[in-house]
Amino acid sequence: MTHRLVVRTALLLLIGGLTRVTAAQAPPAAPSPASRPPAVLTDEAARRAGDNYQRYCALCHGRDREGHVNDHAPSLRSKSLLESEFPVLGEAIGYGRQGTPMGGYLDEVGGPMTRQEIGDMLRWLRKTAAVEAIDMGNHSLDRTIGDATRGAAVYAQQCATCHGTKGEGGTGTALGNAAMLALTPDRFLRHAIVNGRQGTPMPAFGGVLSKTQIDDVTAFLRSRSTGSAAGKRTLRTPPALADAVINATGRAPEFGELKEGRYLSAAALDRELKAKRRMVLLDTRVTSMWQMAHIEGAVPIPYYSRDVTLAALPRDGTWIVAYCECPRAAADSVVKRLREDGGFKNTAVLYEGIQGWVSLGYPVVAGDATKPAATPAKP
Ligand code: HEC
Ligand code: HEC
């Protein structure tokens, strides 16, 4: 293990991220504590996680977490996988991996497990493998700079036999999976490439390929994520709130009744966007996440930006839909503020959050793939 290369990475997301988002949030807007999984695994929770594992996961990942029992399900034992305290793991379990046999286990998408149980499952997997999660810093924007064309050649020579010529997967995971790539930082990919996955066919390329080759192949993988450009990342100026209305000449969306008076499903949002309905989409995550991938047309208004004036938003009853990656805590806080401080009535929160949206196969674009705003965002 090259610990020098062990990376501290962060997205404010799912299981691990939920706690972080709520901690950074202003107290009045905090979501109900019931949605916050405790950080420690009790004996009782460990026993249940073990039972759940055998019931739900052993079929493909193996009774002993060894992997590759069915459908090329990866090993859930390897240190380099489990130590990456990564949303991708929670997402993979909760929402599944679109286009692969890995389904979603979260009750919200029709699965059998609660968010708490999925959190406990991850803690149990780590505990059983005696792996500590790596603390996360904030490097979600950290894009590898490499030459995707040269990377394609490395891929064809070194990776395609296991991961498929088109990244469709085989012995190895589906690396061309847009859902996985859209929300996976380069550091996660690099970590797997450099260190391999112990106890699985995935070799460590740290001593085999040069650093440049690893950068190139990472850039190549990245080049295939939804709407994402390879190479050096250019930060874009997000559109101003005043330009936030999507389909300005369209009719009002018909969202139907909102769950708990607030929540809108990904399917309904997709349907109304496709029908070119007039609305505002607010991305309430940390702005770096907007740069990485967002729903087209969304304007960032991070949950912590209490100083941002809401005056620029339309006052004519235009629907305003907020989303985050938590999947709801940050968006809930912004919508609460819109309703209580701003008097905005037609507001909703995307129930599944953006990771649910992506995992369910709905499109996103990257910040650097969109047209730069003509005018910089107002401070
Ligand atoms: C029907 C077979 C099947 C079942 C059952 C299943 N998985 Fe998976 N799982 C897969 C496959 C296949 C993949 C790889 C998907 C891909 O190519 O990205 C995967 C991927 C994963 C990953 C991501 C690993 C990585 O390398 O990124 C995790 C974590 C995971 N599964 C956990 C679980 C857990 C926990 C359960 C039980 C709650 C479960 N899986 C049940 C087939 C399955
Ligand atoms: C001999 C087969 C094999 C080769 C060759 C191979 N891989 Fe893998 N790779 C795997 C397997 C199997 C896994 C899943 C490991 C597990 O069970 O966790 C994997 C996992 C990965 C992952 C983690 C994906 C995730 O969702 O967690 C990345 C990234 C990756 N490989 C990149 C590469 C790259 C880039 C190359 C070429 C330089 C390569 N691999 C070559 C078999 C291979």
Image (cartoon, rainbow, N blue to C red):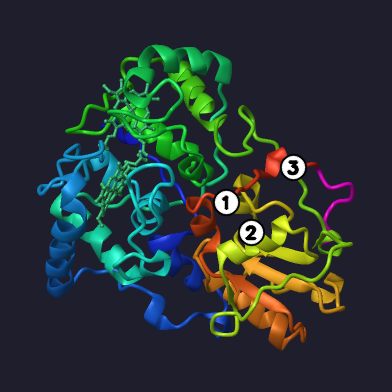
**In which quadrant of the rendered view does residue 231 lie?**
top right
Read off the magenta span.
372-379
Task: Examine the image and state in which quarter residue 157 appears.
Answer: top left
Residue 317, horizontal then vertical, whole percent: 82, 79
Q: Of helix, strand and loop, which mostly describes the magenta segment?
A: loop
Q: Give the side of residue 290 with respect to residue 35, left or right.
A: right
The CA distance from mark 2 to mark 1 is: 7 Å
| Chain-order first, disc 2 or disc 3 | 2
List the residue tagged with mark 3: 370
Q: Quadrant of the C terminus?
A: bottom right
Residue 227 % position (x, y): 64, 38
Cα distance, mark 2 to mark 3?
Answer: 19 Å
Residue shown at 17% from the left, 49% from the top:
59
Badge 2 marks a residue whose secondary structure is helix
Judge from the rendering whether residue 149 lies leftward or rightward of residue 69; answer left or right.
Answer: right
| Residue at (15, 69) in percent of width and height | 48
Q: How far apart are the two marked residues, 3 and 1, measured between alpha carbons?
A: 17 Å
Do residues under tags 2 and 1 come within 8 Å of each other at their CB atoms?
yes
Residue wearing tag 2: 270
- Circle nearer the viewer, 2 or 3: 2
Q: Position of residue 124 (x, y in %)?
A: 19, 59
Residue beneath disc 1: 362
- Vertical relation: 153 (above or below) 108: above
From the image, which quarter does the N terminus lie in? top left
On the question of residue 305 being in view, the answer is no
